[in-house]
Amino acid sequence: MAGLPGVSKEAIKEYQDKGDRLIARMNDVLGERAKKEQLTGVQPLEILFDNHKNHHKYLSYALELETEEGITNMVKWVFDSYVSRGFKKRYFKIALNYWKRFIEEELSEHAAQEIIPYYDLMLDVVKEQDGTVDPSPVQLVYVNAPPYEQVKKKLYHLLLDGEYKKCTALTEECLKSSCELKAFYFEVIRPVMVQIGLDWENGVIAFYQEHLATSIIMRLMTDIYMKYHDQITRRKGKIAFLTPPEEQHQLGLTMLMDLLEFDGWEVLDLKQKAATPDTIRQVVEFKPHIIALSVTMVYHLPKAEQVIQRFRDNEATKDVKILIGGYAATVMGTSKGFIDADLWMDAQKDPIEFINEWWDQHEMG
Ligand code: B12
């Protein structure tokens, strides 16, 4: 932790153990106030209760592993995302102050003293956000960024309109003319999906549109894979890919697995399969050079840690390199060095190049 002192394991355990009590008190008080002061805008109270649960789940993890930057990013995201859905800005200040008060009342003095500075940090972030203007509607920052502006813009609108056939035609046209498959995935699909995520976060598009876009992209990628898969030649190493069991984000990982296969890697797809004895056996039989984990949600990192531990504890896999990547591990820039991985995906790098560089070094001994 850069500026703030670390929090002891005992204090975190107390915070976790008292979670139900803290959440119940938050729901009681904030539930009443929200009704009187319309703190949730048009949103039902369940969203507020969910937020209290998620807040506690995230902090239980973040107090141990997150950087201040990670916590700051997360608070900004929660603030923007809830305010754009109608939550009153002042809810966050009120809620954090109540968290502080209940922590002081429910936890030992020692534990509370260690944890409260993190709540002060979050309050500072919220106060700063309070002065900002409301999230603006559609800012196509990523979509407009070069290169491939026109294609990205077209794809963005076709996806939101659910135009699967037109998306296919656009993809074919693009791949035939100017664009390589990797560039199409990383420089067209990825920024468009990130934009769709931002627009959803800012309340500009509906949840169903994000779902629709994802399902079209997954189908597009399956079509592309089926079209080219007989050209695959295996000349590099083997990678087993896993996600924590509850991780639903699979699009980036699928993109990566397909591109690696086209690039000569042999890939074992074990996404969303927990590291059960069956999964471990499959990995052992596969004899991978790398076991890779993809984690998007920060609060799935502890599960990722458990998965890693299972492989570290197994005689047959204990020396296999563990690689971690995905939004939580890279974009949020958090937890590096805390989780016991050998390789961390660098956010600035192309993941295929990153993995190939490792392979080249491995081959050179
Ligand atoms: C599509 C999507 C979904 C879909 C996923 C469907 C699917 N089958 O994949 C659904 C609807 C299920 C979903 C659900 C949720 N989502 Co969502 N989702 C997205 C969205 C819009 C796109 C994700 C994506 O495909 N990105 C494009 C790919 C190409 O990028 P990528 O995943 O980062 O992968 C690249 C690299 O990271 C790397 N990589 C990935 N894995 C690995 C692994 C290794 C080893 C390596 C080396 C590299 C690597 O390679 C890829 C190519 O470069 C993002 C927005 C965003 N910024 O990404 C939000 C986003 C990730 N989701 C978000 C949220 C909040 C949620 C939900 C909590 C929403 C909710 N309230 O229900 C749930 C959580 C579900 C869960 N338990 O996992 C937030 C996360 C915010 C945060 N601060 O953590 C985001 C950022 C949206 C936002 N801006 O608010 N989501």
Image (spheres, rainbow, N blue to C red):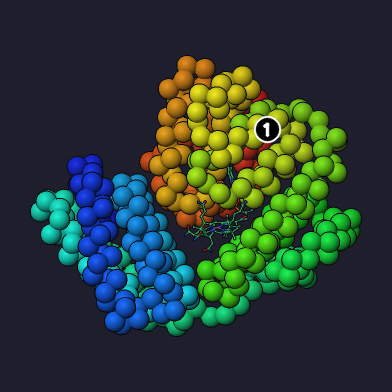
Disc 1 residue type? Val
Residue sitting nearer the eye, 182 or 25: 25
Q: Which residue is drawn at 81% across and 34% down?
A: 232
Q: Residue at x 81, y 30 (%)?
A: 233
Q: Residue furthest top?
A: 315
- Picture quadrant of ligand 1: bottom right
Residue sitting nearer the eye, 70 or 350: 70
Point out residue 271 in the picture as x, y percentages from the top left corner.
59, 39
Q: In this view, does 117 lie above or below 233?
A: below
Q: Residue at x 32, y 72 (%)?
A: 92
Tell me the residue that label 1 is attached to.
267
Q: Which residue is drawn at 33% across and 61% down?
A: 52
Instruction: Give the structural element (helix, strand or loop) at label 1.
Output: strand
Q: Which residue lies furthest to the left in this view?
A: 109
Residue sitting nearer the eye, 339 or 348: 339
Point out residue 307 in the picture as x, y percentages from the top left corner.
46, 33
Q: In this view, does 119 lie above or below 220?
A: below
